[in-house]
Image (spheres, rainbow, N blue to C red):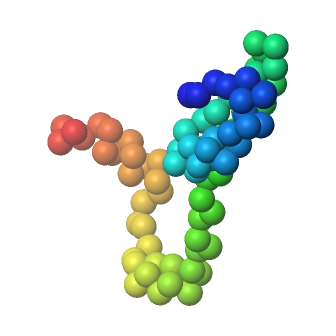
């Protein structure tokens, strides 16, 4: 994490923003105390394609036993 005083941040804002865009975090100090922090924005996730998801899951067979019974059997078996 980069730490800069406020006057330096004002003078070099473009460079600091480039640094943050590359993934770094920049903390800004005023009189030696942290007052602000620049962090990169997380990229937005793509929306889920419901039609595709349904096309995949429609071909799956339903589970015969409950998830709890399946996990107990898996846990208690000697295979694992």
* Left/right of residue 2 with respect to residue 58 in the rendered view: right
> In the orientation shown, which residue stands out farthest toward the left?
79
Instruction: Look at 67% across and 48% down and name the residue there.
Output: 14
Residue 76 in the image, given as x and y percentages of width and height: 29, 37
* Left/right of residue 77 with respect to residue 65 in the rendered view: left
Q: Quadrant of residue 2?
A: top right
Viewer-proximal residue among 58 and 49: 49
Q: Considering the image in quadrants, where does the N terminus appear? A: top right
> In the orientation shown, which residue stands out farthest toward the front?
11
- Can the viewer see residue 58 in this picture? no
The relative height of residue 8 versus residue 23 in the rendered view (above or below) is: above
The relative height of residue 22 versus residue 3 in the rendered view (above or below) is: below
Q: Considering the image in quadrants, where does the C terminus appear? A: top left
Residue 48 in the image, given as x and y percentages of width and height: 59, 74
Q: Quadrant of residue 13?
A: top right
Instruction: Look at 73% across and 37% down and name the residue there.
Output: 11
Q: Quadrant of residue 61?
A: bottom left
Viewer-proximal residue among 1 and 48: 1
The relative height of residue 7 versus residue 77 in the rendered view (above or below) is: above
Viewer-proximal residue among 69 and 9: 9
Residue 32 in the image, given as x and y percentages of width and height: 76, 12
Instruction: Look at 57% across and 80% down and name the residue there.
Output: 49
The relative height of residue 37 versus residue 42 in the rendered view (above or below) is: above
């Amino acid at each position: 994490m980069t730490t800069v005083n406020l006057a330096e941040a004002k003078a070099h804002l473009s460079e600091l923003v480039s640094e943050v865009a590359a993934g770094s975090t920049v903390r800004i100090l005023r009189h030696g105390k942290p007052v602000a922090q620049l962090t990169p924005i997380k990229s937005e996730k793509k929306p889920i394609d419901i039609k595709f998801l349904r096309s995949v899951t429609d071909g799956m067979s339903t589970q015969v036993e409950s998830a709890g019974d399946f996990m107990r059997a898996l846990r208690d078996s000697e295979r694992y």
